[in-house]
Image (cartoon, rainbow, N blue to C red):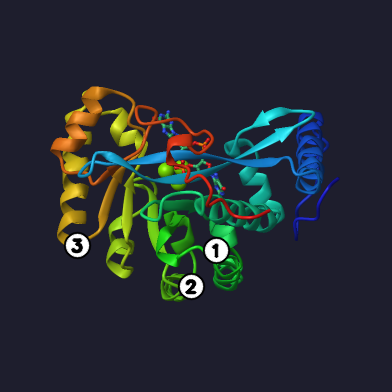
Amino acid sequence: RAKANGRGSFAVYVPELHEQLSERRQLEIDMRQALKANEFFVLYQPFYCVKSQTICGYEALVRWRSAKRGIVSPADFIPLAEETGLIEEIGAWVLRQACTDALDLPDHMTMAVNLSPVQFKSRKIVPLVRTILAETGLSPQRLELEITEGVMIGDQVEALSILKGLKDLGVRISLDDFGTGYSSFSYVRAFPFDKIKIDQSFVRDLGRTTDSLAIIRAVAGMCSSLGITSTAEGVETDDQFHILEAEHCDTLQGYLFGRPGPLQASDIQTGTAAQG
Ligand code: C2E
Ligand code: MG
Ligand code: MG
Ligand code: MG
């Protein structure tokens, strides 16, 4: 399918390009079908709290169990879901599922849910979160919405007003993948985030480069001065754990503490599970 690209543009038939397009088209069709067939599901990865030395919450991570494709990871379908707008529906489903599952956890545990910049900019996000909180009865302060600096690209005034709308609901806002992308510090100054998640690339490089340690120390220090909770993602080894502990990161996340999976049975409160 050639698309008119405005003045002076012309389409050349490239077989590989055509193949790519139909593959994407097929993925889109399959995703729509997946929503109807209930093929999406959520895995939960724990947050470890350094101070209390316990699990203090979970992050919801979506997966797609496709009859045709097997288990598909978000990296392989979220980008197209964002382009096609399907992320709205998928994201709303994940949010509702995660809030419902959070009711099974002890009251002190939080539930983090990733928001796509597309979902965020649709302007429907504030009413959506309000509705889901009301429907599920989850305390707003137990819900953490993870955003990336992508939401700040474009109309910053608009982005800040949506963030404020969310904060007014009583939920917490985390800045995910901190340190990747552009000029994160201006965003930190522009908006009072509750939590900053240091990107896993910095943790991965600990012990390999001294730069990573310096950056983690600086970010953890900044968070502490600003009263923001610091988290490090992608903790896999004891060495990384001990360094991050020494650097006063507040919470840690990574395979060392648990891979994404079903909610840990030991954390589920029996007898208080939500109906339905
Ligand atoms: P993220 O939010 O930064 O999530 C962290 C990713 O790192 C997850 O990959 C997680 O499984 C992985 N991870 C956690 N600990 C470790 C570790 O110790 N080592 C390594 N190597 N990896 C670790 P996942 O689940 O494949 O998700 C990838 C990304 O997809 C997420 O990055 C997030 O941006 C996006 N995503 C996932 N679920 C959703 C969703 O429901 N909605 C939206 N909009 N995006 C989602
Ligand atoms: Mg995240
Ligand atoms: Mg991240
Ligand atoms: Mg990420």
Q: CA distance from mark 3 to mark 1?
A: 25 Å
Residue at x 43% of width, y 36% of height: 266
Residue holding disc 3? 226
Callout 2 environment at 10 Å: few (<14), some (14 to 19), or many (20+)?
A: many
Secondary element at tag 2: helix
Q: CA distance from mark 2 to mark 1?
A: 8 Å
Which disc number belongs to residue 165? none
Is any part of residue 83 visible from this angle? yes
Callout 1 environment at 10 Å: few (<14), some (14 to 19), or many (20+)?
A: some
Is any part of residue 208 visible from this angle? no
| Disc 2 and disc 1 in contact, CB within 8 angstroms | yes
Residue holding disc 2? 162
Asked whether 275 or 62 is in front, the reply is: 275
Residue 212 horizontal side relative to residue 38, left or right: left
Mark 2 Cβ and ligand 1 under 8 Å apart: no
The residue under label 3 is which amino acid type?
Answer: Leu
